[in-house]
Image: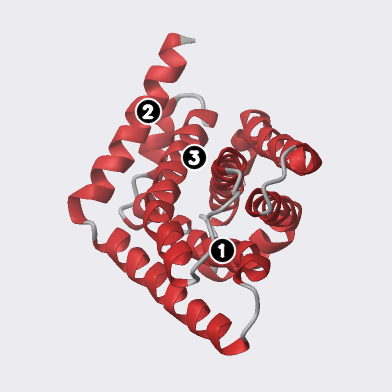
Amino acid sequence: MAEFWRRIWILYRKDLLEEFRSMDHLWSTVVFGTMLVFVFSFAVQLADVSTRQVFPAVLWVSIFFLSVVALQRSFAKEKESAVMDALLLACGERSLLFYGKFLFSFTLLLLLEAVVVPLFWIFLDVDGAGVNLGLFAAAVLAGSWGLAAVGTLLNGITSQLPSARLLFPILAFPLLIPLLIGVVLCTQGALAGQGRSTMGWLYLVFVFDLLFTILPLVLFDYILEG
């Protein structure tokens, strides 16, 4: 088991070092996320609606689009440099590649959300009184976990196809509908200061996350064979 996690850590560290070595993709995604903040905040102010009502949906739609931009390149580097076969041979178990990529994608999403979520909070002028911060943080973490897991799985499926960038968002949205419904309602409950009445949706999100985190342990070998 220790060897299993050591190999995952090596893969995770490799991707993290490569990402921070150039920073081009990371900065372009941050700029895209900032533009989403300004566009949505401008639209909400023109519509003259309660920010507490629209904030959960606006936030998670933005995070979804941000994840599409950020995560669809998780296998692209290996494909462009033609080292995928060598990486698979080095991994031994192909599920190791999924978990290394998944942890990298999860970290990347959290870094981007550390910029985007406070900007949304400020520019939409959300009233912080009575907010259940624990539930809000749990919704963000669980939602990001699910996005990273599904994104990594779909990247593995589409990485060998010529139209991978087009197929990724098309396949991701239907799979992520239960997750998006759950995290939007959890965020709405957190803003309203609710706890128990929203926990069922949070449990649904956790079950979704576990499902798409455990399935690749069995399926990823067949996915990469295809």
Q: Which residue is mark 3?
A: 102
Q: Residues within 10 Å of mark 1 (few under 14, many from 20)?
A: many
- Image location (x, y in percent) of residue 118: 42, 58
- Image location (x, y in percent) of residue 166: 56, 71
Residue pushed farthest top?
Answer: 2
Q: How is the image coloured?
A: secondary structure
Residue 217 drawn above or below residue 35: above
First in residue order: circle 2 vs circle 3: 2
- Image location (x, y in percent) of residue 208: 72, 40
| Towards the viewer: 173 or 53 | 53
Foreground tag (1 vs 3): 1
Q: Is residue 212 left or right of residue 2?
A: right
Q: In whole angstroms, how far apart are the C-alphas of marks 1 and 3?
A: 22 Å
Q: Let me know if residue 9 appears in the view.
A: yes
Foreground tag (2 vs 3): 3
The image quadrant of residue 127 is: bottom right
Q: In whole angstroms, how far apart are the C-alphas of marks 2 and 3?
A: 18 Å
- Marks 2 and 3 close (CB-CB < 8 Å): no
First in residue order: circle 1 vs circle 3: 1
Q: Which residue is mark 2?
A: 90
Name the amino acid type tagged 1.
Leu
Q: Residues within 10 Å of mark 3 (few under 14, many from 20)?
A: many
Dot 3: element: helix
Which residue is rendered at x = 56% and y = 51% of the image? 151
Q: Is residue 158 left or right of residue 23?
A: right
Which residue is rendered at x = 43% and y = 78% of the image? 38
| Towards the viewer: 213 or 82 | 213
Which residue is rendered at x = 65% and y = 70% of the image? 54
Q: Let me know if residue 162 appears in the view.
A: no
Residue pushed farthest left?
Answer: 21
Name the amino acid type tagged 2.
Ala
Residue 59 tag number = 1
